[in-house]
Amino acid sequence: MSEKLHISGAEAVIRCLLAEGVDLIYGYPGGAIMPVYDELYKFQDQLHHVLTRHEQGATHAAQGYARTSGKVGVAIATSGPGATNLITGIADAQIDSTPLVCITGQVASHLLGSDAFQETDIIGISTPVTKWNYQITNAEEIPEIMAKAFYIARSGRPGPVLIDITKDAQFAKFDYSYKKCTGVRSYKPVPTLDHDQVKAAAEAINGAKKPLIVWGQGVILGQAEAAFKAFVEKTQIPAAWTILGLSALETAHPLNKGMLGMHGNYAPNLLTQECDVLIAVGMRFDDRVTGRLDAYATQAKVVHLEIDPAEINKNVYADYPVLADCKASLEALTPLVQPKKLDEWMARFDELYKQEYEVVIEKDLRPQKEGLSMGEVIVAINKASKSDAVIVTDVGQHQMVACRYAEFVRSKSNVTSGGLGTMGFALPAAIGAKMGAPDRHVVAVIGDGGYQMTIQELGTIFQTKVGVKIVILNNDFLGMVRQWQQLFFEKRYASTEMTNPDFVAIAKGYYIPAKKVTAREELESAVAEMFATDGPYFLEVVVEKENNVFPMIPTGASLTEIRLS
Amino acid sequence: MSQEPIRYTISIYSENNVGLLNRISAIFLKRHINIESLTTSLSEIPDVFRFVIVVMVTEPQVQKLVQQIEKQVDVIKAFYHTDEETIFLETALYKVKTSFLFEERQIQNFIKESHANIVTVSPEFFVIEKTGFRHETDALREALQPFGLATICALWPYFGLKSPHGYLTNLKFVQRKPNLDYGKLFQPTIVKRAITATGQVPLYGRRRICRRSYSS
């Protein structure tokens, strides 16, 4: 763009957002960001601002938006407490590689370091949890830095960027012109694919007798779903997912063997310890996936397709690293690999699945007890949504159950806080997720604990009328912590029991249609009614108080020590 | 790979941006690793900044540190070296009462024997400068101790490479970020300049540190 405009820094911020194709931002106004809000008022036809009820909600909503739309989420807040309240969402986005641009106001530059009202060193505070951050003290820097922020947030391995703008820079006028950022000299977002690495990886895969694919969010972030499916289908190798990789390959695919890690499926966890070649695609060997690291897949040669060089050999040694965007590496790899006949190996998966089904899954989905199980609620959601809802989950038992049993037919359908495990994530994230995918059903499945951490965002739902379906799985406990107390702390339930309010009354206070289900026979019709209702809906399901999530790999144990009960 | 913590020198070529020091030190903080010494200055390449950080860690640890450092947007490249691959020289300044210079003849001998220089003399204090290996600067400090050594300051370690020819082969560097604009960054010609600079210490930043120490 070559237009020359003499405008304020605040207006420049808005024009930069528009130039980056942003039409929706989340935020909360305050003193040091008021010039930008004043411009937002003038530009409200082009740039929609969603007022969350807390700045943490703004970052989580921006995350949800980014995760379902594939675009960069934008959150905006004032200095001091406004800025520090963003941090949880930023840290969550950093560990889960979500592209965010966060804009904070800052006290005027002549006041920096003077402990001025609502001054905080947000650059210092956000440094360890951002991909990049920058403080603007001069309006003329705004176009270049904003362009750079969007470029860095979305390129390579995505992540959050924070831009802090002093109030004087927001007021100052300058000659504005915008140029998109196409590169930063010290930053190479995507490594160039090395064909020797691809060949070596292909040879290892072709020689494998018992191969296993483990994939992560890289497949979704790299828009490599089709390339991944082609690779899986050509090789006929069984594949399992990390929690953030979920929905990249449809649940019903015969080669989709389920979830990895602490509460993952029995077969892929145990067979990780038996495979001869482990093909990791866009995943980072989190400790929740590997269990005890020195006992993890020690027998296997590891092929690691990864975009971030810092992930190679970080946790698991990669015998065959392939550094590139995983779409590029998969597309290069697929022509070089041969289809496999793995009947015996596949039979092992079936056999272990059968064991898991008998001991765990049947009980979860068709419980004999009177109380409802979390699993049957998820099944009801699958049924009513024809397995095509976006499922947003919080953190804890309900999250594990939802990820284990939710069914998906398309990608970008699972939004959860994986790496950071942020309770309170789901409700605001669901707001963003629905706005990022307005044509889809978005169901927030939340525990009674996490729900109350960001319950104020019901106000945002009410004000925006965003059609989020909220399902609370209420066991009057912080269920996952209680499970650990039961298994590892001899049932000393320290501060995990919750005396809960009338959730239905609270939802109704926000004029959101609400219903409570306590009996099995009401469940299906209630879920169906929820989906049939236009706009937001609140459904509380009272579930069995002391159910546990299995299988389980205790912390610090190896995958072979996975317990079914 | 060595599992014992040993001394590694990490050298980082970067942009010169506000906050980068914080970002880099946070990588050590997050892993609970103490920094033994840290120097920042302009590098031998115009417009490129250099950090030299010394840590006691294992080789797997230093590799991961370097990978995380290189991952930072403002970092161009990072390397790590063992002691065998580096030369440590440090500049020490010793502040001694001027009266001792005349009363204690040994001091003049120490200065001569250790090839140190007197950089300034005032009626009250004079300042000796010594550039050398740690054991040499330590020896001079011990020698001066009985004679009213007032302060010793401005320890400034820096590093160079033993052999310009061995630069690329000797260095174990984690090359993960092939450079677009800095393709010539590590050509031998530039390296030679770095070596010369090491011997003569005309580097940016040193004079500033000296000045500050004068006033102390």
Image (cartoon, coloured by chain):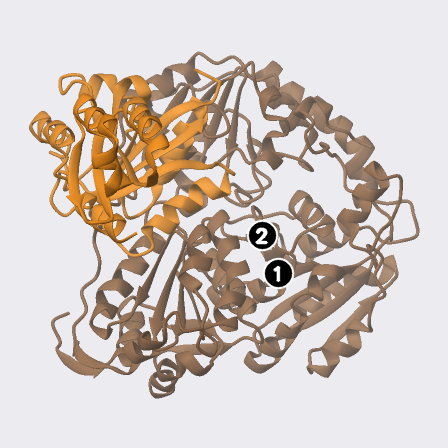
Image quarter in which the N terminus of chain A is found: bottom left
Image point 79% across, 45% down: which residue?
Answer: A365
Q: Secondary structure at mark 2?
A: loop
Is residue B204 rendered to the left or right of residue A213? left
Q: Colour of chain A?
A: brown
> Which amino acid, by three-letter code, is at mark 2?
Ser
Find out whether the residues at labels 1 and 2 contact each other: C-beta distance under 8 Å: yes
Chain of the residue under label 2:
A
- The image quadrant that residue A145 belongs to is bottom left
Image quarter in which the C terminus of chain A is found: top right
Note whether residue A45 is visible.
no
Chain of the residue under label 1:
A
Query: Image height check: is A202 above or below A511?
Result: above
Q: Which residue is mark 2?
A: A417
Q: Tag on residue A67?
A: none
Image point 50% across, 47% down: which residue?
Answer: A95
Out of A322 and A391, give the one closest to the viewer: A322
Furthest residue toward right: A370
The location of residue A409, given as percent across then percent down, is 55, 48
Query: Image height check: is A525 above or below A257?
Result: below
Q: Any idea which chain is the orange one in this picture?
A: B
